[in-house]
Amino acid sequence: MFSARRLAAALASPLLILAAAACTPDVSHQDAKPPLPKPSGPASDGKNGTLGLLDAIGRLKMARESRTGYERDKFHLWTDADHNGCDTRKEVLLAEAVKKPRQGKSCRLTGGSWRSYYDDKTVTDARKLDIDHVVPLAEAWDSGASKWTAQRREQYANDLGADRSLVAVSLGPNRTKGDKDPAEWMPPARDATCTYVADWVSAKLRWKLTVDRAEQTKLQLAAASCPRTKVSFTPAP
């Protein structure tokens, strides 16, 4: 089902289940994605539970990456899973709006405002926003998605079941990020570090994606400055 925050924006898709990274920032930055309720159950059950950020990073498997065979078209983007007229991009825009846009025919959105946590800016024109895969498609391919079916890659590319997998952000930082991992790129807003690392780790745990050594090292270094940050996730079906 769609996450609690996105339930109001769209009906549930049977292919998706709840997953999220609950982040308690260690700085004053007000993330557009606030902390989510903690799931029930033991905090260290490895499936549904809240983990400290360093513990969560420790659960990521390390492996060499390979981009052999990658093509962006192998991930079918922006589907309308619940057939309500709003594709994945627009569902995220509706769910993350600080001020809700007007929704017209064929889910045409006008007005509204959003907070891009990558650069800590308010955006009032949806055309100036990208919907970023926190773990980029190419990075997902490198770290496990190359072995998936086309259907599973489509689920990943349109993952509305996790509040932290897709984010609405300013064009500039997202285009600069490209397909880089945290060893190569971090959000320019200093206060975004803990949120971003938690989001990255949550997405990788949800989809059982691996990390390489440089990526793991960067995540651990960043996490050292985020002692109160928590991660929760539910594995994708």
Image (cartoon, helix red, strand yellow):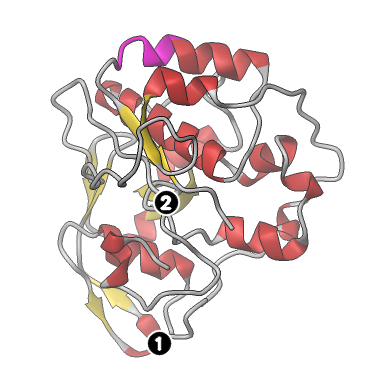
Residue shown at the point (22%, 27%) measured from the top left? 25
Classify mark 2: helix, strand or loop. Answer: loop
The three-letter code of the residue at mark 1 reads: Ser
The span picked out in magenta is 221-226
Residue shown at the point (32%, 65%) measured from the top left? 6
Image vertical order of residue 9 relative to residue 183, above or below: below
Number of callouts: 2
The three-letter code of the residue at mark 2 reads: Ala
Choose between 105 and 14: the one closer to the eye. 14
Residue 95: give x, y in percent of width and height. 29, 63
**What is the quadrant of residue 142 in the picture?**
top right
Quadrant into which the N terminus falls:
bottom left
Residue 113: give x, y in percent of width and height. 20, 58
Work out which residue is located at the far bottom of the displayed protein and give it: 105
As drawn, is 135 to the left or to the right of 10? Answer: right
Which residue is identified by label 1? Answer: 106
**What is the quadrant of residue 173 in the picture?**
top left
Classify mark 1: helix, strand or loop. Answer: helix
Image vertical order of residue 236 relative to residue 120, above or below: below
Which residue is identified by label 2? Answer: 19
The magenta stretch spans residue 14? no
CB under 8 Å between callouts 2 and 1?
no
